[in-house]
Image (spheres, rainbow, N blue to C red):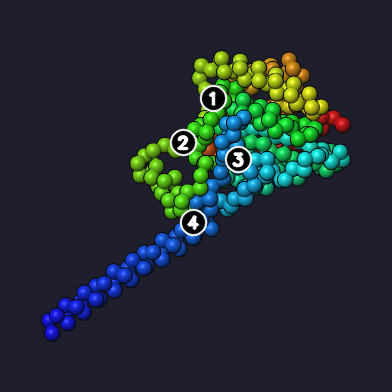
C-alpha cells in the first residue's frame, strides 16, 4: 500500500513537470512567433561582403521589421526594381549615400526622402521620374565611389551624392564599422536577437555598436584631402556618363552649428570651385529641435525625411532648369 502511494506521488510529480515544461515551451513558441511575425525580430536587413565596396546590401530582400518595410532590389538598392535601360521619356535620379539616405529599418520605405521625392517630383518636372537609392549604413565617400565605379550610374540623368557632417573626415568603411541596424547573418531565433541586441547590452551596460560615420572624426585633415580628391573623381565619372552631379548636404542635426559648419564650408568651397550644385540643408534643419526631426540626433525620423525631400524639391527647378 505504501508503495502504491509513493508511486502515485511520483506519477503526479512527473505529470506536473511535464505540464510545466510543455507550458514553458508553448510560451516560448508563442513569444518567438510574435517577435518574429509582429516585430520582425530574427529577420534583420542583411549586408554582404563585396570586393569593390567592402560591403553592400544583399540583393532581393523584403523585410518587415518594427512595422516598417524595407525592399532591397537586385542591385542592392533600397528602391524599386531598376530596368537596365532607361526610358528616354523618364527622368532618372540616383541617390548615393550612407545610413541617412538608406533611412534605417525604423522608417518605412515609403517615408524615406528618396521615395517622397519619387512621388512628388513628377508634378514639378512634368514628366515621369525614376529614383534609385544606392546607400548602406556607414558607407564613406570611398565606398560610394566604388559602387558607382563598379555598378555604374544606371543611365541616370542626375546623381545626388548625399553627405552628412561626418563624411569628409571618414575613411573607407569596412564591415566591422557597421552598427547594429544591419548584420551579415540572420539570428537563429527572434528570442536570441531580443536578448543579444536589446536586453544583454542593458543588463551588462554595453554601449551598442554605432556606424563609423555617425560623428565627425578629429584630426582628419589627410582623410579630408583624400575625400576631396575622390569627389573630383566622382564628378568626372558622373559627367563622363553625360549626367549632372550634385551634392546634398544633410548634417547631423545634433552637430549644428558645430562641427557641421566646418564641413559645410569645405564642401561649399569645393562645389563652387567645381561648378557643382550644392543642396545645403543646414538652415532647414536648424529651424527644428533635434528630437523633432531625428531618431537619435543624426538619423532622420519621418518628419526629418519629409523636410529633406521638401528642401530638395524646392531647390530642384532653380538648380536643374529645363
Q: CA distance from mark 3 to mark 2?
A: 18 Å
The span from disc 1 to disc 2 (Cα, nearest Å) is 16 Å
Q: Is residue 261 above or below residue 7?
A: above
Quarter location, residue 1: bottom left
User: In the image, what residue occupies the spot 38% across and 45% down?
Assistant: 200
Element assignment for label 4:
helix
Reading the image, the residue beneath label 1 is 216
- Of the residues under marks 1 and 2, which one precedes in the sequence? 2
Asked if the residue under mark 2 is in contact with the one under mark 1, i.e. CB atoms within 8 Å, the reply is: no
Along the line of sight, the residue nearer the viewer: 300 or 209: 209
Q: Choose the circle earlier in sequence order: 3 or 4.
A: 4
User: Which label belongs to residue 183?
Assistant: none
Q: Nearer the viewer, mark 3 or mark 4?
A: 3
Q: Residues within 10 Å of mark 3 (few under 14, many from 20)?
A: many
Q: Which mark is residue 57?
A: 3
Mark 2 Cα-neighbour bin, 10 Å: few <14, some 14–19, many ≥20 = few
Q: Earlier in the sequence, mark 2 or mark 4?
A: 4
Mark 1 Cα within 10 Å, few/some/many (few <14, many 20+)?
many
Q: Is residue 94 shown left or right of residue 220? A: right
Asked if the residue at tag 4 contacts the one at tag 1, i.e. Cβ–Cβ closer than 8 Å, the answer is no
In this view, the mark in front (1 or 4):
4
Question: Which circle's residue, 3 or 2, is located before the other in the chain?
Answer: 3
Q: Residues within 10 Å of mark 4 (few under 14, many from 20)?
A: many
Distance, label 1 to label 4, CA atoms, is 35 Å
At mark 1, the secondary structure is loop
For label 2, the residue is 209
Mark 1–mark 3 Cα distance, whole angstroms, equals 24 Å
In this view of the protein, which residue sits in the foreground, 91 or 184? 184
Q: Which label's residue is closer to the chain start, 1 or 3?
A: 3
Label 4: which residue? 35
Are dots 1 and 3 in contact, CB under 8 Å?
A: no
Amino acid at each position: 500500500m505504501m508503495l502504491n502511494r509513493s508511486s502515485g506521488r511520483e506519477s503526479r510529480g512527473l505529470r506536473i513537470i511535464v505540464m510545466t515544461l510543455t507550458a514553458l515551451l508553448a510560451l516560448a513558441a508563442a513569444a518567438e512567433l510574435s517577435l518574429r511575425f509582429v516585430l520582425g525580430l530574427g529577420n534583420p536587413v542583411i549586408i554582404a561582403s563585396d570586393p569593390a565596396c567592402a560591403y553592400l546590401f544583399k540583393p532581393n530582400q523584403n523585410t518587415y521589421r518594427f512595422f516598417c518595410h524595407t525592399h532591397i532590389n537586385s542591385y542592392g538598392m533600397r528602391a524599386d526594381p531598376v530596368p537596365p535601360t532607361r526610358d528616354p521619356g523618364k527622368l532618372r535620379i540616383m541617390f548615393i549615400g550612407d545610413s541617412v539616405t538608406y533611412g534605417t529599418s525604423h522608417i518605412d520605405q515609403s517615408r524615406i526622402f528618396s521615395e517622397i521625392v519619387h512621388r512628388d517630383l513628377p508634378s514639378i518636372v512634368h514628366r515621369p521620374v525614376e529614383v534609385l537609392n544606392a546607400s548602406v549604413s556607414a558607407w564613406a565617400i570611398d565606398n560610394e565611389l566604388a559602387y558607382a565605379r563598379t555598378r555604374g550610374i544606371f543611365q541616370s540623368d542626375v546623381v545626388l551624392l548625399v553627405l552628412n557632417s561626418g563624411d569628409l573626415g571618414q575613411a573607407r568603411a569596412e564591415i566591422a564599422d557597421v552598427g547594429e541596424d544591419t548584420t551579415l547573418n540572420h539570428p537563429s531565433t527572434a528570442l536570441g536577437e531580443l536578448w543579444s541586441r536589446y536586453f544583454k547590452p542593458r543588463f551588462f551596460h554595453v554601449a551598442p555598436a554605432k556606424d563609423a560615420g555617425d560623428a565627425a572624426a578629429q584630426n582628419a585633415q589627410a582623410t579630408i584631402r583624400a575625400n576631396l580628391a575622390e569627389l573630383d573623381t566622382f564628378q568626372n565619372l558622373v559627367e563622363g556618363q553625360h549626367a549632372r552631379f550634385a551634392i546634398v548636404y544633410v548634417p547631423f542635426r545634433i552637430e549644428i552649428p558645430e562641427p557641421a559648419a566646418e564641413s559645410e564650408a569645405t564642401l561649399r568651397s569645393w562645389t563652387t570651385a567645381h561648378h557643382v550644385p550644392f543642396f545645403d540643408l543646414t538652415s532647414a534643419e536648424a529651424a527644428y529641435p533635434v528630437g523633432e526631426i531625428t531618431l537619435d540626433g543624426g538619423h532622420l525620423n519621418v518628419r526629418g525625411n519629409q523636410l529633406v525631400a521638401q528642401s530638395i524639391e524646392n531647390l530642384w527647378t532653380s538648380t536643374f532648369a529645363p
